[in-house]
Image (cartoon, rainbow, N blue to C red):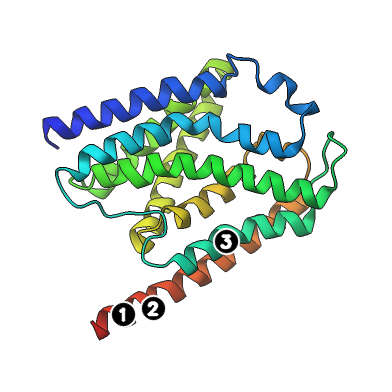
Amino acid sequence: MNKKSIQRIMLFYLIGIFLSNVFRFDLFHIRESTDTLNILLVSLIAPLGAIGLLLGALISLHLLKKERVTQYSLFGTSKKWSLIMISIPIILLVVTGVENSNNENIHYYGLMGGIGTLLYCICEEFGWRGYLQDELKPLKEWQRVLLIGFLWYLWHLSFINNQDILSNVKFLGWMIFGSWGIGKVIDSTKSILAATSFHMIINLVMFNQLIKNGINENQKLIIVGVSIVICFIVIKKWERENKTIANNA
């Protein structure tokens, strides 16, 4: 990587880690009142926890595009398949319903909670995959995966609230595994939204600020399992479609 590349990465990460964590650690005490707010407002507030990554990525991507053509976009090679993939976990949340303390209809809450989670994950994926994975293309895959995974882990600053070494090692392992898996998805589809769908699945496995304990473990397993199966089927169809288009070009 050249000097300009390192400077862009530093700019992205500094904006991402400082601006996002202002909201993630609730320095403005916004989250204190979310239990009494309408879920529509809560779902719009949730993405602020990753807004720094989105802003940092947009700035650094603008600078990167002056140097070379970038590989990824919001819809990648197919708007249709991108929209289908991000719809799957949201539809499952709506059908299942999410119990909540806001006295909202569980299916409506599932819709709004799913949309809020989607917006949050889009902000993250614009950063980690949409920008950083593209920027790090000159590196070998294992180097890229380890670096993105470590920066992703460090961005959460989880070690501040949880200083248990084993928990942090496990979390780091999840971030590295996620960087590898989601990285494969975006390389195949060129779509930030496709990557977002898998990020949402990971987000549902872990503690989700919007969903909280609104779905039980069995419901969670069903939503995650069905989402993964359908998304893999979609990706296979997507790849075949891309090959057909390439062969006819």
> Is 164 left, or right, of 219 in this rendering?
left
Q: Position of residue 157 (x, y in %)?
A: 49, 22
The outermost residue toward the bottom is 248
Q: Quadrant of residue 88?
A: bottom right
Q: Residues within 10 Å of mark 3 (few under 14, many from 20)?
A: some
> Is 149 left, or right, of 197 in this rendering?
left
Of the numbered discs 3 and 1, the one sitting upstream in the chain is: 3
Q: Position of residue 245 (x, y in %)?
A: 31, 80
Q: Position of residue 128 (x, y in %)?
A: 38, 41
The outermost residue toward the left is 2
Q: Which mark is residue 245?
A: 1
Q: Residue at x 42, y 52 (%)?
A: 192
CB atoms of marks 1 and 2 within 8 Å? yes
Q: Nearer the viewer, mark 2 or mark 3?
A: 2
Q: Which residue is mark 3?
A: 228
CB atoms of marks 3 and 1 within 8 Å? no
The kind of residue on which mark 3 rests is Ile
Q: Quadrant of the N terminus?
A: top left
